[in-house]
Image: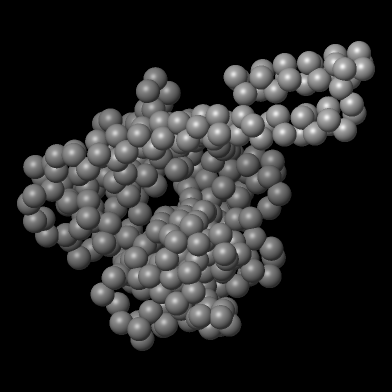
Amino acid sequence: MLATLSVAIVAVEIGLRLLAGGIGFEQALFLLVIAPEFYLPLRALGAKFHAGTEGKAAAERLFAVLDMPISVEARHVVPLPSNLDIRFEDLHYAYGDRPALDGLSFALEAGQRVALVGASGSGKSTTAALLLRFIAPDSGRIRVGDLDLQAIPPDEWRARIGWVSQSPYLFNATIAENIRLSKPEASDDELIAAARAASAHDFIEALPQGYATVCGERGQRLSGGQAQRIAIARAFLRDAPLLILDEATANLDPETEAEIDAAITRLMAGRATLMIAHRLKTVVRADRIVVLEAGRAVEQGTHAALLAASGVYRRLVERYEF
């Protein structure tokens, strides 16, 4: 503010002198041009102050997370059941005073593909966050076989999950390092096999440095389709029995979407899959569709059966382009 006001005062003074004939036009223009540059160090100081304040706040939050004690339950080794039948039982969760889930119950059996559909705010993403153990339910529970999910150490549980989100995060590292995030000890042969399965190997090999190409923060040096295929390659490399898909083909051109869709179809084979569907186009392949409304499962069934029922799902199909 000080720099802006000062430049404004200089401009007014120059204008008045120019009108009164006290200064030539060339000199007035020169002073007007260099006045903002004179206050540049002051503006830079302000920008650095704000950046420092934001960095301090971020560091405080990071250290708060790092200082969080490990829960007692996470110190015990809990043998996971070989059969990953998952049951969501009367789940409740609220963000402050806004309920997100209100008694949600459904099942995801081993090898089954279940799609969650519903209007924005119906609880789809919250359900995925609970299954990933990013958050814990206020009441109710998720059972894995005979175990309560909260009794399983988070790291051990997440090692059983392959997750492909709508906007996968790529770090400012090489493509190989980004894929290996899901399995750091993977060999080069395993890495390439995962990339081939995700239809990513050909475009990676075409890059100047191949697998050693740096992606850039958030994958800024790659297209959206390329970044998505790297995320799918991560899931192939992990080879987990449970897969969570959060609209992995959104915001892509038709040709790229078709390639990624084929890769995802291969990825889902033999795995229990929870599909978070924001677009109804993606749910036809599901074995069962769970329709959410206000945090509850109001309908369940196949695409054909739900259409025939003329309920909430049919209204969603009619409302959105299928």
Name the foreground residue: 191 vs 232. Answer: 191
Image location of residue 12, percent across then percent down: 79, 16
**In this rendering, would 295 be left or right of 219?**
left
Q: Is residue 152 above or below residue 49?
A: below
Image location of residue 210, percent across then percent down: 50, 81
Q: Is residue 156 above or below residue 178?
A: above
**In this rendering, would 167 be left or right of 151?**
right
Name the foreground residue: 312 vs 52. Answer: 52
Question: Residue at left 33%, top 31%?
Answer: 92
Question: Residue at left 39%, top 27%?
Answer: 95
Display coloring: one colour
Image location of residue 181, percent across then percent down: 34, 65
Name the foreground residue: 145 vs 252. Answer: 252
Total numbered badges shown on the rendered structure: 0
- Quadrant for residue 208, please give it: bottom right
**In this rendering, would 234 be left or right of 319?**
left
Q: Residue furthest bottom?
A: 189
Q: Is residue 322 above or below residue 185?
A: above
Image location of residue 100, percent across then percent down: 42, 31
Q: Is residue 57 visible?
A: yes
Name the foreground residue: 289 vs 136. Answer: 136
- For the N terminus, give its image quadrant: top right
Question: Residue at left 56%, top 34%?
Answer: 41
**In this rendering, would 316 be left or right of 98?**
right
Question: Residue at left 41%, top 78%?
Answer: 194
Q: Is residue 236 visible?
A: no
